[in-house]
Amino acid sequence: MDENTPSPAAVRRVACIGTGVIGGGWVAHFLARGFRVSAWDPAPDFEARLRRLVEAAWPALTELGLADGASRENLVVAETLEQAVAEAEFVQESAPEDLAVKRDLLARIDAATPPGVVVSSSTSGYGMTEMQVDCATPQRLVVGHPFNPPYLIPLVEIVGGERTERWAVEWAAEFFAATGKSVIVLDREVPGFTANRLQEAMWREALHMVANGEATVAQIDASITEGPGLRWPLLGPCLTFHLAGGEGGMAHMLDHFGPSLKSPWTRLEAPELTDELREAMVNGCEEAAGGASIAELVAARDRALIAVLRAIKDVRRDLL
Amino acid sequence: MDENTPSPAAVRRVACIGTGVIGGGWVAHFLARGFRVSAWDPAPDFEARLRRLVEAAWPALTELGLADGASRENLVVAETLEQAVAEAEFVQESAPEDLAVKRDLLARIDAATPPGVVVSSSTSGYGMTEMQVDCATPQRLVVGHPFNPPYLIPLVEIVGGERTERWAVEWAAEFFAATGKSVIVLDREVPGFTANRLQEAMWREALHMVANGEATVAQIDASITEGPGLRWPLLGPCLTFHLAGGEGGMAHMLDHFGPSLKSPWTRLEAPELTDELREAMVNGCEEAAGGASIAELVAARDRALIAVLRAIKDVRRDLL
């Protein structure tokens, strides 16, 4: 952090390096939030693809509400990486998932970005510790991992590497929140972070089922979209099971379904349901419920399910 | 199947045995679809709890639209199991997940239910083969596994046991569909069926993360509700990743992210990404997309995300 570090809420110029599905999605997000965005990608035809992606996203962003001054004309296509970041107050890197590529690119970005400016990587799995090794000023590099499409899904997971300084993580959390994102700050590097670990577990089970002829792709997708997937926009896996326990909540659920953790319901082995884990889950659910009773949560879940079912029905009718 | 077996669409009287969270939810579903429902549970105070559950569900069901003749007055509380099923044209069992309890209860239901009438179990994990062992006429027993709450979540997974006859599976699929459910018929018994295997994999990973202090309950839930959980009501895990591949779809996604299947992103080991599996995933996604192009799917996903985000925002405002 130095005299170049802007206040997170004062940032106006961001750079996006790498403009594929994720990087292009970031460009659309920042344009919609009123930023001036300079973008660069090594692909010779990237500008056409990027503008197509922004065009496709713009109706959705317009419907959600653009920030004051938001315009597609604030997109500046740079000729070099160095040009793209030269005046940036924040940089988001979204290169392919290849460690050597990430290391090299982040070192080049670090060398060309004004000191004190935070650089964030969209990596879906690498730790910043292993990516920042060739950077001269690694203290300002963080992971800021989005979900596809970054212009609509709120989640950003933020975590630093061993050589990242704490201020950079805090700055990034404030900055992303100021652009309307929902931020989770992780205390330590875990491969895949949080959301990817969770969805990857489900994805691997799905691949096993297809590989073994236990279910088709269509059955797997329907089992989620017609089933538990409808609950997850309002209640995550923990609060969902808090309600599965009826009036007894998570405590009853763990005591009742605990034994089925020993069943071969997936290829993923369950942890031992120790007293400590049971207590962490029960207390965590009570905190996450924020004082709402089971009855209040059930009523909210039902309202959410009705709204989600209706919303999806309209979209499906148009699609199919 | 015999002269007692009604046409699936002609059923008017159903019995629900076991009236906890799931069984009571079934009662609410069938009442809302206009059925006469006879219910029984061994708990002495079950009637009060059941009526409370139906009362709590009724506003949601009313808002979604009740069937002609639907009324809470069509609930008949039986004094014995035998009385409950004596005139039933379909029986749904929702006892606790205890194999001995299920075996005993299903044998009693089987003995008291008119011949040719299909009996379905809500079990979330047992196979019908292991549950039907003590039944005199096991050929009409199927698993009909719902999701909580059964009166709002459409999915029902149907699968028979070794002694179940094919007509019973087909009859149950037709009957549940006639009551507005989304039906998946599985060809063979797989522990946990499909949706539970998938969500259980995620749940076990979540328990590991809490047990190891890698994330809190609140972080785990937020990582889903603010992230991938928003996509799953419209697009299951397979079509979601079909879109993650950009214009190249699932084929590009597997070729690009295939190597990360080797990464320790979860405690669940990934299967080998063989040519056969790659082809099954790619072809499955193309079929599941039903001819929709990537661009059309992206546009539909964005519309769904906006609708879901808006729906959830209102519910959250009321809840928190």
Image (cartoon, coloured by chain):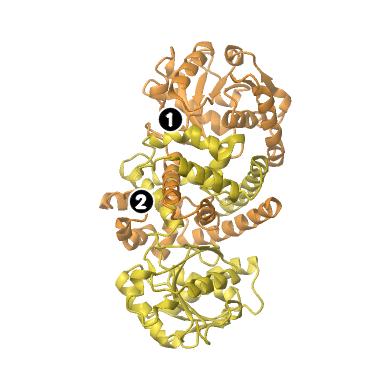
Chain colours: A yellow, B orange
Q: Amino acid at mark 2?
A: Met
Can see residue B150? no
Left or right: where B34 falls relative to A104: right
Left or right: where B182 falls relative to A202: right
Residue marked by disc 1 = B159
Can see residue B24? yes
Name the residue nearer the viewer: B56 or B14. B56
Residue marked by disc 2 = B281
Q: Amino acid at mark 1?
A: Val
In the image, residue A108 lies at what x, y percent? 36, 82
Q: Mark 1 vs mark 2: tell me if same chain.
A: yes
Q: N-terminal of the two: label 1 or label 2?
A: 1
Name the residue nearer the viewer: B82 or A182. A182
Label ID, residue A133: none
Left or right: where A135 falls relative to B46: left
Mark 1–mark 2 CB contact (< 8 Å): no
Q: Residue at coordinates 37% horizontally, 46% vertically from top-left? A: A205
In the image, residue A269 lies at what x, y percent? 35, 42
Label 1 environment density (alpha carbons within 10 Å; few <14, some 14–19, many ≥20): many
Q: Residue at coordinates 53% horizontally, 11% vertically from top-left? A: B112
In the image, residue B225 lies at what x, y percent? 55, 54
Picture quarter containing residue A151? bottom right
Vertical relation: A83 (above or below) B48: below
Tag 2 secondary structure: helix
Q: How many marks?
A: 2
| Host chain of mark 2 | B
Tag 1 secondary structure: strand
Picture quarter containing residue B36? top right
Label 2 environment density (alpha carbons within 10 Å; few <14, some 14–19, many ≥20): many
Q: CA distance from mark 1 to mark 2?
A: 23 Å
